[in-house]
Image: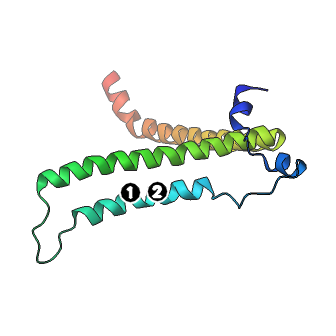
Amino acid sequence: MSTLEALLVDDDDDSQQKSQGRPQPEEKPDPLANIAQDLRKAPKSQLELNNAIPGRTGPTPEHIKETAEFGIKDLLCAATSVSAEFVRIGAQFQVENPDDATDERIKELDTTIKQQEERLEQVSISLKELKRRHEPLLTERNL
């Protein structure tokens, strides 16, 4: 078993629990949903902390700076967690479905190659047009 597969193996595998006759725990919350919710909460909490309430003194610039620093750290942590969860899900898919993952990767590469060829054609056309426009200037300098 590779290191990647070992990292993805869940100790609480449902199939093992069913075969051993253990009672099933309640459905686990979706980790991606929890992480996405944390990502949405980070900016919202900053707005709530730094809004001035009518009739009260607004927050001081030092307070705003301090809470903004913590908020940026929270937002960065939440965004990193979302990214890590997507990477984990993608790696898990590749391990569980190697044929599908390979087919998907081949399609992505074919699409990328086609896009690069189209861009090369566009650049070639642009260069020919520039050369055509500036050719009279080049011939004048050579004379």
Asked if labels 1 and 2 touch by Cβ distance under 8 angstroms, the answer is yes
Q: Residue at x 83, y 52 (%)?
A: 22
Q: Which residue is mark 2?
A: 38
Q: Which residue is mark 1?
A: 42
Task: Classify residue 116 by image quadrant.
Answer: top right
Element carrying mark 2? helix
Structural crowding at the residue carrying mark 1, measured as other residues with C-alpha within 10 Å and reported as few (<14), some (14–19) or many (≥20): many
Residue 124 against residue 56 in the figure, above or below: above
Looking at the image, the residue that sits furthest to the bottom is 55
Location of the C terminus (image quadrant): top left
Q: Amino acid at mark 2?
A: Asp
Q: CA distance from mark 2 to mark 1?
A: 6 Å
Q: Position of residue 70 (x, y in %)?
A: 29, 48
Give left or right: position of 86 versus 68: right
Q: Position of residue 142 (x, y in %)?
A: 34, 22
Question: Number of numbered discs present?
Answer: 2
Q: Position of residue 137 (x, y in %)?
A: 34, 33
Residue 141 against residue 45 in the figure, above or below: above
Residue toward you, 132 or 27: 27
Residue toward you, 115 or 66: 66
Q: Residue at x 54, y 57 (%)?
A: 34
Q: Residue at x 53, y 45 (%)?
A: 83
Residue 66 against residue 139 in the figure, above or below: below
Label annotation for residue 63: none
Give left or right: position of 56 versus 91: left
Q: Residue at x 81, y 44 (%)?
A: 100
